[in-house]
């Protein structure tokens, strides 16, 4: 096994695989997990955290899930990620409804972001050659 992989990461990738193409990326001492190139989860502090939002957070909280928190400049900070329920960590079947909630939250977050401004189009240079001038009546 490569040093970038670990048992928890491999297990989480297996749990989330039924949703689509799963990949991970090392970040901030942990791993980010993508399904079909949509960031839906992270592994930090040896725990899996799933994306949540205002619509899905109550379901996670009712299941006893804990928010992802970290220390930022001496102050506690959190992101919209909550631990997966313990029973969801047992099998891909048990994880599926929770992973779908995370995917839905990630898709809503993506849709809410304003589109990145497109770079201004460069004007095409005018053809000022003698040949172009001669072609004009």
Image (cartoon, grey):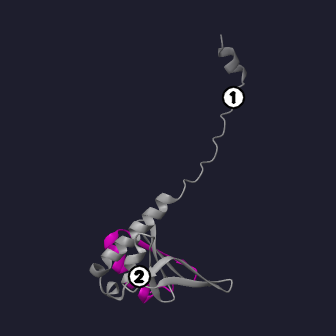
Tag on residue 61?
2
Quadrant location of the C terminus?
Answer: top right
CB atoms of marks 1 and 2 within 8 Å: no
Q: Quadrant of residue 36?
A: bottom left
The stretch drawn in magenta includes residue 4:
yes
Q: Position of residue 47 (x, y in %)?
A: 46, 87
Q: Is residue 59 above or below residue 105?
A: below
Q: Could you give the CA–CA distance between mark 1 and mark 2, rounded to whole angstroms? A: 63 Å
Magenta residues span: 1-29
Q: Is residue 23 above or below residue 137?
A: below
Q: Is residue 32 above or below residue 126?
A: below
Question: Horizontally, is 38 left or right of 134 in the view?
Answer: left
Q: Kindly give the residue lying farthest to the top in the view shown.
A: 137
Q: Which residue in the structure is indicated by mark 1?
A: 126
Q: Is residue 101 above or below residue 86?
A: above
Q: Residue at x 35, y 76 (%)?
A: 98
Label 2: how many Cα within 10 Å (few below 14, some 14–19, many 20+): some
**Of the pair 64 and 40, the residue shown nearer to us:** 64
Q: Quadrant of residue 76?
A: bottom right
């Amino acid at each position: 096994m490569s040093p970038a992989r670990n048992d928890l990461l491999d297990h989480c990738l297996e749990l989330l695989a039924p949703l689509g193409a799963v990949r991970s990326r090392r970040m901030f001492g942990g791993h980010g997990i993508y399904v079909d190139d949509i960031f839906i989860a992270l592994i930090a502090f040896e725990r899996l955290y799933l994306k949540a939002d205002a619509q899905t957070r109550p379901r996670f909280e009712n299941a006893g899930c804990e928010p992802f928190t970290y220390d930022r400049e001496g102050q506690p900070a959190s992101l919209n990620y909550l631990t997966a329920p313990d029973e969801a960590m047992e099998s891909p079947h048990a994880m599926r409804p929770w992973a779908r909630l995370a995917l839905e939250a990630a898709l809503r977050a993506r849709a809410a972001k304003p589109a990145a401004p497109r770079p201004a189009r460069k004007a095409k240079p005018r053809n000022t050659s003698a040949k172009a001038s001669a072609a004009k009546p």
